[in-house]
Image (cartoon, rainbow, N blue to C red):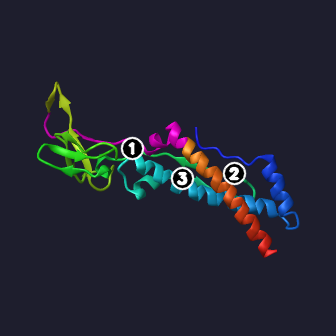
Amino acid sequence: GGIRIEINQQQLDHLKASVWKIRDGAPVVLRRAINDTLTGVKTDADREVRAVYNLKSARVKKDFKLRRATDSNLSGAFVASGEPAGLFQFGAKQNKKGVSVKVLKSEPRKTVRHAFIRIPATRAYTGRQVFWRAKEEGKMVGRDPLHRLEGPRIEDALAKPEVQEALEQKASERLNKYLDHETSYLLGQA
């Protein structure tokens, strides 16, 4: 499941009563508040993921998509989906025994034996990646094939119940704050 925040009937009635003089006032306030909340949820989700995984913000946000509210559709969505992050993204360093990485912030670096860092010749992956060779019957074989090593997916961190609850709580607080803010802004314009 995803993060779900809703406006109850009491909030909606209060909003309509506040901006009843302004034509299309309530939908405008709702649209702006929803979209501002979505932007905040993206920031909060990025912080939550980076509290667990040793990743850069740009890599985390790459997997986030926002579907913003419009005048005709007063709902928005925040979706996290994408490929697992390559192991190189987790601070990979080559050493004599293999490649050391720090995936989780709460754990020390670990060495992946026999792994190596290189820029692949194929276009399947861009930039530096961590690879290791295939094994047959427990022994390394020739030069091919190479296997790209990957870390966990971003959405796996967001799927944890404690992260979901924290994000829903923050999103609900943000939505209420932005509803008040946009209402007072619209009334100030009138």
Label 3 crowd bin: few (<14), some (14–19), many (20+), radius 10 Å:
some
Disc 3 element: strand
- The number of callouts visible is 3
Residue located beneath label 3 in the image: 65
Residue type for callout 3: Lys
Q: Earlier in the sequence, mark 3 or mark 1?
A: 3
Q: Kindly indicate whether the residue at mark 2 contacts the one at mark 1 (C-beta within 8 angstroms).
A: no
Q: Of callouts 2 and 3, which one flags the residue occurring earlier in the amino acid sequence?
A: 3
Whole-Å distance between the Cαs marked 2 and 3? 14 Å
Q: Which residue is outermost to the top?
A: 137
Magenta span: 141-164
Across and down, in percent, residue 98 comes to 16, 44
Q: Position of residue 162 (x, y in %)?
A: 51, 39
As shown in the figure, which amino acid type bears the numbered disc 2?
Ser
* Magenta region includes residue 6: no
Q: Up-down: is 111 above or below 56? A: above
Q: Is residue 189 left or right of residue 40?
A: right
Please name the residue that numbered disc 2 is placed on.
Answer: 75
Q: Residue at x 20, y 42 (%)?
A: 111
Instruction: List x then y, in percent, for residue 59.
Output: 40, 54
The residue most toward the left is 96
Magenta includes 150?
yes
Q: Amino acid at mark 1?
A: Pro
Front residue of 48 and 124: 48
Disc ID at residue 84:
1
Q: CA distance from mark 1 to mark 2?
A: 28 Å
At x 34% / y 42%, what residue is drawn?
151
